[in-house]
Image (tube, helix red, strand yellow):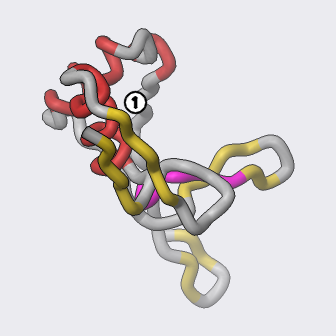
Amino acid sequence: MRIGIIGAGISGLSAALALRKRGHEVSIFQRESSLGGLIGTFDLDGLQLEHFYHFSCQTDTGYFDLCRELGLEDRLRFTRARTGFYYEGKLF
């Protein structure tokens, strides 16, 4: 069967992978020039920053299972979040 998927975010890419495993012919249609959807990034002077405020949590086991299956698990990094507010010349 030929199937079209709109969007190359994590859901669209995961659906395409599952359908290909079942032997279907899959085409993905993506408006932006990059992949990733809500978890996509852009380069800012050599630093990869997310397009949107979206993140993966350590409890997102389905996502980690997918990364392990694709051989990408070693590319995941978790760091302690350091956020704050800058107000009247002081960082809180």
Q: Which residue is mark 1?
A: 78
Task: Tell me: residue 34, above or below residue 75.
Answer: below
Q: Residues within 10 Å of mark 1 (few under 14, many from 20)?
A: few
In terms of image quadrants, where is residue 26?
Answer: top left
Where residue 7 sits: x, y (%)?
42, 59
Residue lying at 42% horizontally and 65% vertically, measured from the top left: 53
Is residue 75 toward the left or the right of residue 23 in the image?
Answer: right
Is residue 42 toward the left or the right of residue 61 in the image?
Answer: right
Q: Nearer the viewer, residue 66 or 75?
A: 66
Q: Nearer the viewer, residue 71 or 46?
A: 71
What is the magenta range? 37-42
Q: Nearer the viewer, residue 31 or 91?
A: 31
Residue lying at 44% horizontally and 24% vertically, measured from the top left: 76
Amino acid identity at mark 1: Phe
Is residue 65 toward the left or the right of residue 27 in the image?
Answer: left
Q: Which secondary structure lies at badge 1?
A: loop
Residue lying at 75% horizontally and 50% vertically, measured from the top left: 43
Q: Nearer the viewer, residue 12 or 84?
A: 12
Q: Is residue 43 magenta?
A: no
Quadrant where the N terminus sits is: top left
Task: Tell me: residue 75, above or below residue 11.
Answer: above
Task: Tell me: residue 32, above or below residue 76.
Answer: below
Q: Is residue 82 visible?
A: no
